[in-house]
């Protein structure tokens, strides 16, 4: 009997280590294929011309950051007030409905949102603001839509985690409700909000389809100077080019190297998120 | 400006932001529903695609169903087992911490990276070819960490007294887990699995690299045959269709995908409510 | 009592889920078994000239419409065949046929020496001819009348001419679309038109002929190049040195760009592979080639 119990424990431990195994395998295969192309020039080069074996990804990396930072900023601008409303003002049933719909919405297929961007946003930007429509701006909006639900949910959680006594103390000192929110509650929840931002950035960096469909993917990306410029992201470059890259060629290695860069960025963000959340808990 | 009127303005701004964030998704749902409902017909749902922009989406629907069921078959048991270990057995040491860190890392992994890995490891290295099997396994890598996270949380919320009572009655640890802890944690586990399924249904980048081109004209008949899927079909038609018929089909397929996705998600919430009610009795 | 009932509920739930998943899986597996039995019966009956089984084709998006339509016709003619046709590009087609990942690869450009060295056992078939046409939006005032030389086209696609005004059109930027590195269409276009020049860096990369055409059809100031088979009434083809991009003009050599469409197998083709390739090369397949706007091999 005891033997069976310990066997079960071992089997469960094996399943639990399976995700670690997958992460190791991913690291191994990405590095095996990507390392031949990784070099300083790969990270700092300005020209991406696979045909002539110029693999500079700096403009792509900067393009990615532009798109991601803008999207997270927009999502914060809309998401944090929504979270404040939900935790401080909304009646219980409104909060309930919104929270469960947010839970559902988090997983809405990105290709549908990309389709929306392609059919509605791109022509709209083209006709009213100018440029080609396929632009960083379109990428911002599409990505912000994608990260908004998670951001609202996490921010609301951390706002609600602020003890009631804080609110009462502040109100008792004569502060208005608004002052209480901006001076007491939001600062007290700030580490939770920071963690939500980091997770949002991670999600935005890794998002492929929706962004790919609206940002234009120029032949040779440049460091963007305007929000109406087209650009490439790390993910979109892999997605458009992987199937055409000759297998075993420097081009294919370069695409895997982009995968390595993505992997490192996301793992680093995960480190930061774990760190921020841990400090929050202590 | 006095604080009271400033407060009013701020509150109004707050409501604008709330309205903005609440309006986006209904807009998308209505947009897809409005444009997509016209093409939906028995014929569209039961025939195969022809000449790229014509025909129906039956093989794509079935391809998505097979991919997701297989992915659940691999991902859910593994995820639940991992969660049981992490919540019930794991000693608080380095090994457990690193297992948890790797699970989080996998959860944050961009789907295109998982797709690249699936292509390199499953399709080429293990010679599975671009197939139903390779696609489903790659999808389960995506789904795994979400299942683990939700199940672990659900198991942890089971009150400690349940375990103590069961152990006191002479049950072994495993008996306690199977008979007491898991039934009590079921709503959370089920919700977690179903939300993972919802994620897998809509995933595009992974199946693009591992499962097939998306326009396959027949339902996969074995694990090794390539398979179409709704997200790939939508992507191809959304970007390449230039006729009204093609664009209509992209809308129609989006509507079907959204219905499948919402069906899974809503049943996740309903499953949870049902169990919560039962537990409340 | 209640806990037992709850346990029962859980068991039923698991059973239910299991049954559903089982049913879903049983379908293809059982179906596959039936097919295999049938195939065995047919082949053991000495009828091994009847093609049966699975066939995967991948590669150039230029050949995609031909192969897809031919596959549909072929499957109607031979009920126990299942042909899956995927895109992915010429390089992908050569690579995956050479590595055995798919049964037949297809390419709209000639195979490179490096690829032949890597995959020496590729057997090569030609199934049609094609050209590359330059297209602009039908609402562009220049639609139908724009006539450029190869050099001028090179200047447009490399960014030396950037405004429609310089070509006699409206005062607006020329918005160039291009295919991605590795595409057969891009390679042929580069060879005939651009030479050593680079594509203009603001050209938006579209990973298929279909997306090139859709982009130009939706953009009044767009210009792109596509396979001849993709030219239709939604877009307007540009004349090159006064010659229209038509099948006749390519055949008689007046239109300057021409290329051959290829298919590959790894080693000599088996029964199913060769009957499918022969079907495409035969009268029915070549009729499809012609109907879709490509050029038959005969």
Image (cartoon, rainbow, N blue to C red):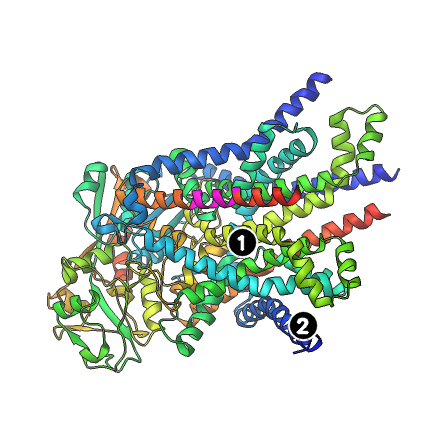
Classify C134 as above or below B180. Answer: below
* Badge 1 and badge 2 both on one subunit: no
Mark 1 → mark 2, Cα distance in angstroms: 26 Å
Q: Secondary structure at mark 2?
A: helix
The answer, for residue C202, to whether it is visible in the render is yes
Could you tell me which chain the residue with mark 1 belongs to?
A
Q: Secondary structure at mark 1?
A: helix
Kindly identify which residue carries mark 1: A200
Q: Is residue A270 magenta?
A: yes
Q: Position of residue C296 (x, y in %)?
A: 21, 60
- Quadrant of residue A105 in the image? bottom right
Q: Using the image as rendered, state which of residue C204 and residue C255 is in the foreground.
A: C204
Q: Using the image as rendered, state which of residue A213 and residue C214 is in the foreground.
A: A213
Kindly identify which residue carries mark 2: B11
The quarter of the rendered structure image containing the N terminus of chain C is top right
Which SS type dominates the magenta stretch?
helix
Q: Is residue C193 magenta?
A: no
Q: Position of residue B139 (x, y in %)?
A: 51, 44
Magenta stretch, residue numbers: A262-271
- Quadrant of residue A261 in the image? top left
Query: Who's the residue at 65% across and 29% down the image?
Result: B92
Q: Position of residue C293 (x, y in %)?
A: 26, 66
Q: Residues within 10 Å of mark 1 (few under 14, many from 20)?
A: many
Q: Are marks 1 and 2 in contact (CB under 8 Å)?
A: no
The label nearer to you, 1 versus 2, is 2
Query: Who's the residue at 50% across and 50% down the image?
Result: A202
- The reply, left or right, for residue A210 in relation to residue A47 is right
Could you tell me which chain the residue with mark 2 belongs to?
B
Query: Who's the residue at 68% across and 73% down the image?
Result: B7
């Amino acid at each position: 009997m005891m033997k069976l119990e310990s066997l079960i424990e071992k089997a469960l431990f094996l399943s639990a280590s399976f995700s670690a195994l997958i992460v190791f395998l991913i690291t191994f295969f990405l590095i095996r294929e990507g390392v031949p192309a990784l070099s300083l020039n790969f990270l700092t080069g300005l020209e991406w011309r696979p045909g002539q074996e110029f693999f500079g990804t700096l403009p792509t990396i900067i393009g990615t950051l532009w798109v991601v930072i803008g999207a997270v900023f927009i999502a914060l601008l809309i998401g944090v007030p929504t979270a404040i409303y939900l935790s401080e003002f909304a009646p219980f049933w409104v909060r309930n409905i919104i929270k469960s719909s947010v839970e559902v919405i988090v997983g809405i297929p990105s290709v549908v949102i990309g389709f929306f961007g392609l059919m509605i946003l791109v022509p709209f930007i083209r006709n009213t603001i100018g440029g080609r429509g396929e632009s960083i701006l379109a990428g911002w909006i599409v990505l912000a839509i994608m990260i908004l639900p998670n951001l609202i949910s996490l921010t609301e959680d951390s706002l609600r985690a602020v003890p009631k006594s804080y609110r009462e103390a502040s109100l008792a000192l004569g502060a208005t409700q608004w002052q209480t929110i901006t001076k007491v509650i939001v600062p007290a929840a700030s580490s939770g909000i920071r963690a939500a931002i980091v997770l949002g950035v991670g999600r935005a960096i890794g998002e492929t389809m929706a962004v790919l469909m609206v940002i234009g993917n120029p032949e040779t990306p440049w460091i963007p100077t305007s929000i109406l410029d087209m650009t490439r992201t790390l993910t979109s470059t892999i997605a458009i080019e992987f199937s055409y890259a000759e297998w075993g060629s420097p081009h294919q290695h370069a695409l895997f190297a982009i995968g390595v860069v993505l992997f490192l960025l996301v793992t680093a963000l995960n480190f930061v998120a774990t760190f921020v959340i841990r400090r929050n808990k202590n | 400006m006095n604080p009271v009127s400033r407060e009013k303005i701020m509150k109004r701004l707050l409501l604008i932001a709330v309205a903005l964030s609440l309006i986006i998704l209904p807009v998308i749902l209505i947009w897809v529903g409005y444009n997509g409902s016209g093409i939906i017909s028995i014929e569209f749902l039961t025939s195969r695609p022809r000449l790229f922009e014509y025909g129906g989406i039956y093989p794509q629907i079935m391809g998505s169903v097979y991919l997701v069921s297989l992915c659940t078959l691999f991902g859910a048991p593994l995820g639940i087992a991992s969660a049981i270990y992490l919540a019930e057995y794991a000693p608080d040491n380095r090994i457990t911490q690193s297992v948890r860190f790797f699970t989080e890392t996998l959860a944050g992994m961009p789907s295109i990276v998982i797709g690249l890995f699936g292509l390199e490891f499953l399709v080429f290295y293990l010679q599975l070819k671009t197939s139903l099997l390779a696609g489903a396994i790659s999808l389960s890598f995506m789904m795994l960490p979400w299942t683990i996270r939700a199940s672990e949380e659900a198991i942890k919320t089971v009150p400690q007294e349940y375990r103590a009572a069961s152990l006191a009655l002479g049950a072994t640890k495993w008996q306690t887990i199977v008979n007491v802890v898991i039934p009590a944690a079921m709503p959370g586990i089920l919700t977690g699995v179903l939300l993972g399924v919802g994620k897998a249904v809509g995933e595009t980048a992974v199946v693009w690299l591992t499962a097939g081109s998306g326009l396959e004209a027949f339902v996969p008949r074995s694990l090794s045959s390539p398979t179409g899927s709704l997200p790939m079909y939508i992507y191809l038609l959304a970007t390449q269709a230039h006729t009204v018929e093609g664009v209509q089909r992209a809308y129609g397929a989006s509507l079907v995908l959204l219905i499948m996705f919402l069906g899974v998600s809503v049943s996740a919430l309903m499953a949870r409510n049902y169990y919560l009610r039962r537990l409340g009795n | 009592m209640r806990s037992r009932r709850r346990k029962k509920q859980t068991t039923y739930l698991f059973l239910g889920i299991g049954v559903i998943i089982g049913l879903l899986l049983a379908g293809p597996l059982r179906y596959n078994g039936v097919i295999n039995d049938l195939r065995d019966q047919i082949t053991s009956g000495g009828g091994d000239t009847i093609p049966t089984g699975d066939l995967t084709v991948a590669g150039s998006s230029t050949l995609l419409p031909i192969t897809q339509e031919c596959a549909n016709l072929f499957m109607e003619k031979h009920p126990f065949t299942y042909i899956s046709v995927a895109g992915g590009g010429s390089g992908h087609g050569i690579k995956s046929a050479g590595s055995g990942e798919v049964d037949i690869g297809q390419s709209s450009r000639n195979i490179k020496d490096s690829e032949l060295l890597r995959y020496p056992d590729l057997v090569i078939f030609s199934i049609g001819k094609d050209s590359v046409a330059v297209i602009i939006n039908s609402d562009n005032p220049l639609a139908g009348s724009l006539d450029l030389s190869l050099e001028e086209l090179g200047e447009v696609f490399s960014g030396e001419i950037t405004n429609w005004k310089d070509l006699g059109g409206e005062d607006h930027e020329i918005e160039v679309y291009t295919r991605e590195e590795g595409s057969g269409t891009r390679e042929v276009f580069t060879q005939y038109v651009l030479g050593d020049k680079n594509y203009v860096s603001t050209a938006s990369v579209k990973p298929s002929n279909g997306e090139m055409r859709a982009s130009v059809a939706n953009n009044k100031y767009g210009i792109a190049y596509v396979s001849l088979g993709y030219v239709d009434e939604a877009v307007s083809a540009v004349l090159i040195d006064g010659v229209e991009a038509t099948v006749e003009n390519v055949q008689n050599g007046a239109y300057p760009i021409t290329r051959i469409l290829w298919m590959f197998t790894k080693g000599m083709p088996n029964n199913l592979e060769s009957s499918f390739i022969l079907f495409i090369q035969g009268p029915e397949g070549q009729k499809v080639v012609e109907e879709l706007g490509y050029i038959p091999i005969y």
